[in-house]
Amino acid sequence: MGIVGKRVAATIATTVVLLSATACGGDEGTAGSEPLTKAQIKQAALNQGDVPGYTIRDNSDIKSDPSAQAVQKSCQPIVAVMAPVVSSNDERLALRSIVRTSTGSESPEASFQLVLSSAGSESAAEQAVQDLRNAISSCSSGFEVTLSGEDYRIRQVAANKTDLGDKSVDFSLEYQMGRKIRYVMVQNGASLTKISASDQFEHNFIAIPQKIVDAQQRKLDEAAK
């Protein structure tokens, strides 16, 4: 695996979107406002061909450290978006790597990581969105976090303007080392879509394409029928 491949793999393992602490196990429930089953989550998550111009890979089998945590407890909802955890067969979660590559280039000009999860209820999903908003506000000046046993300093967290509606959160996060990543989280009934975006070297913030968000929402709407 080349340097870029290793970096993308590391990003998938430590920086995408996490199944929130409110996510519930089991395979009960129906689509819509009720929690989706594991099978429904797998079917509803984006797959190759769903978004023209992007390569989509299923990385749901990738594991990461379930002990990731912020020193300040109030910042933990942000960490829940930074560090995906797929540590239990009970967790209803699908993880996707989405890459956009320029014509004639073998290196991705931008990479996006998506986590589609089902919270325990619609109200739990709504609470997850509110908890994230509160954390961004209280932790805007930065915080300390432990990821995969390593300590990091987050320099700042900033909320971004969004056209995704009241059930969404869009924010940017910068590490002390200069690494820059942007995230969105969107609630749809009891489901949560979380997407991160970074450029090739993670030196600049880049927006999450509306077409990716829209495509995922369409598949969730189909699952709810």
Image: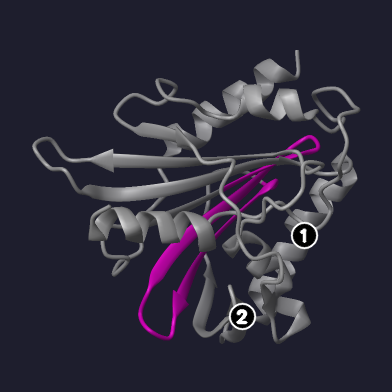
Front one among 166 and 50: 50
Which numbered disc flags the more N-terminal residue, 2 or 1? 1
The quarter of the picture where residue 131 lies is bottom right
Q: Give the residue at x 76% y 30%.
A: 38
For the question of whether residue 206 can be seen, the reply is no
Q: Which mark is residue 203?
A: none
Front one among 105 and 150: 150
Please state, as top left, top right, bottom left or bottom right, where the C terminus lies in the image.
Answer: top right
Give the labeled residue for mark 1.
Answer: 130
Asked if the residue at tag 1 contacts the one at tag 2, i.e. Cβ–Cβ closer than 8 Å, the answer is no
**Amino acid carrying mark 2 in the image:** Thr
Report if residue 38 lies within the magenta region.
Answer: no
Q: Give the residue at x 68% y 63%.
A: 80
Q: Position of residue 27 (x, y in %)?
A: 86, 29
Q: Is residue 217 left or right of residue 20?
A: left
Q: Which mark is residue 146?
A: 2
